[in-house]
Image: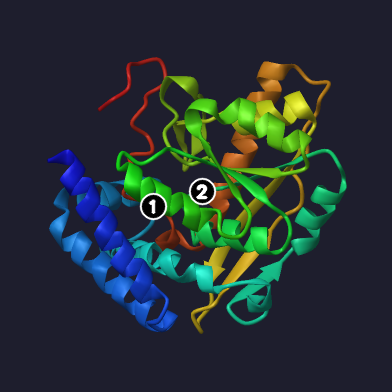
Amino acid sequence: MKRLRYLLEAAAFAVLLGLSRVIPRSWIRKMGRGLGALARRLNSRHRTIALTNLQTAMPHLSDDEALEITHNCWKHFGEILLDTLSVRRLGPDSVGTEVHYEGLEHVQNAYGSGRGVLLFSGHFGHWELIALMQGHLGLPLSIVARPLDNPYLEKMLTALRGSSGNILIYKRHAVRAMVKSLRNSIGAALLIDQDAREEGVFVPFFGRPASTTPTLARLALRTGAMIIPMYSVPRPDGSWTIIYEPPVEVDPEADRIAETHRVTALCTAKLEGWIRQRPELWLWMHRRWKSVEGQERID
């Protein structure tokens, strides 16, 4: 039965993938927003988690403001979920029309430094688009991800993610593979906003301790790679702006434990700043603070 379910899921994905090649992207985005709104209505558990997370993180918001932001959050993630299927249409000639850049010189200079490049973002904006377009710009990435349970779907998604020359790395082999990529002048990208359980270090995130992956800071200290923050925001016409910020400074002479904590906290603070500007673009449905410092994780 499980194999049959996996095959049906893969078949449905293949149909959507095929349709995404011929349907205008504007239609796909509208369909995605409708799908997100429907998911919000049907998923009361994550609807509650999203609203509680937002109101705890940003208590200055009125109830109406918080509801509007979470409504738009669900619509946003429905939109980018479906839009990810259509991004294979994009290429280098999409720059200036479908995709715009700010701070591109920061990542270009980092790649040209020969030191290796670590890029970070969060489940904010359109992270799959950032990675795909960077491959088209000749700045390939190794992307860390958890494999899907469905092997047929995983194979199709891997092909989609690698369509511009990027490489997918699975979490269980992530550190070794990222070190290899950095030594071969291939950038490595991480999303740093998920609960890292007992492997994480606790740093402030919206005023609360949050278990956060230390991998970014540890790799920078180990390899000397440069850390580049990156994120994306939508424009009114449906295109996207991808933004690269100046490198995060890392002190290789500092105490490793203290510097790991400092760099992790600094990168997390940058992510928080982006979210405060556009809160509807972040994944409030995730239980970001479920690990509690000094206690067993809350499940």
Q: Residue 36's spot in the image, x, y percent?
A: 27, 65
Vertical order, 223 against 232 (above or below): above
Q: Which mark is residue 293?
A: none
Residue 183 seen in this snapshot:
yes
Dividing the picture into quarters, in which one does residue 177 lie? top right
Residue 274 as seen in the image, left or right of residue 9: right
The earlier-in-sequence mark between 2 and 1 is 2
Judging depth in this view, the residue of 287 and 188 nearest the camera is 188
Vertical order, 155 against 222 (above or below): below
Q: Which mark is residue 122?
A: 2
Q: Residue 105's spot in the image, x, y percent?
A: 81, 61
Residue that protrudes farthest toward the right in the picture? 113
Residue visible at 68% across and 20% down?
258
Dot 2 lies on which element? loop
Q: Amino acid at mark 2?
A: Gly
Looking at the rendered image, the quarter that the C terminus falls into is: top left
Residue visible at 51% across and 34% down?
204
Classify 10 Å Cα crowding around label 1: few (below 14), some (14-19), many (20 and above): many
* Circles 2, 1 touching at the beta carbon (< 8 Å): yes
Vertical order, 287 against 75 (above or below): above
Residue 262 seen in this snapshot:
no
Dot 1 lies on which element? loop
Q: Residue 200's spot in the image, x, y percent?
A: 49, 25
Q: Which residue is mark 1?
A: 283
Dividing the picture into quarters, in which one does residue 223 lie? top right
Looking at the rendered image, the quarter that the N terminus falls into is: top left
Residue visible at 21% across and 60% down?
40
Residue 118 as seen in the image, left or right of residue 28: right
